[in-house]
Amino acid sequence: MTPLIDVIFLLLLFFMLSSTFSRFSEIELSSAATGGNADATPPERLFVQLGPTRVVLNGQPLSLEELFDQIQAGQVLVSLDPGTTAQRLVDLLVPLRGREGLTVRVLE
């Protein structure tokens, strides 16, 4: 009986140490679409090219911190370079998520 209890505790210890207890959160993505209200004045559109090592806002290279300072309101279109990681995209989207009057669209 004692070896069985030892094995059970070893299995319990193994599964406790091999599992992760961190919570994963979701990032809401919306892809760009055509259409819209033609009567309203169009919002300011900003074009961001995001790469593994570069960030370009309307053709001007910036750092992420400078980008967050320049984007206040309007519509941001994000184009991803090949090789851009999901973490890099999350680093861009999370600070922009809570801003009032700002919509972010990720281009396909």
Image (cartoon, grey):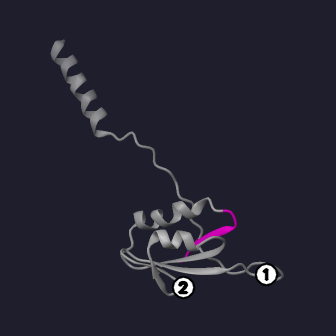
Residue 17 marker: none
Other residues around mark 1 within 10 Å, as few (<14) / some (14–19) / many (≥20): few
Q: Quadrant of residue 17?
A: top left
Other residues around mark 2 within 10 Å, as few (<14) / some (14–19) / many (≥20): few
Could you say which is closer to the camera, residue 53 or residue 36?
Answer: 53
* Vertical order, 87 against 20 (above or below): below
Residue 58 marker: 2
Q: Position of residue 87 (x, y in %)?
A: 41, 63
Q: Position of residue 18 (x, y in %)?
A: 28, 39
- Badge 1 marks a residue whose secondary structure is loop
Find the magenta span and give its range. Answer: 100-107
Q: Residue at x 53, y 58 (%)?
A: 27
23 sits left or right of 68 in the view: left
Q: Quadrant of residue 106?
A: bottom right
Going from the N terminus, do you reach mark 2 or mark 1 first?
Answer: 1
Q: Are marks 2 and 1 in contact (CB under 8 Å)?
A: no
* Vertical order, 88 against 54 (above or below): above
Kind of residue at badge 2: Asn
Q: Residue at x 44, y 74 (%)?
A: 63
The stretch drawn in magenta includes residue 39: no
Q: Position of residue 35 (x, y in %)?
A: 72, 80
Residue found at the far right of this picture:
39
Give the residue at mark 1: 41
Separation (CA) of disc 2 from disc 1: 20 Å
Q: Residue at x 74, y 81 (%)?
A: 42
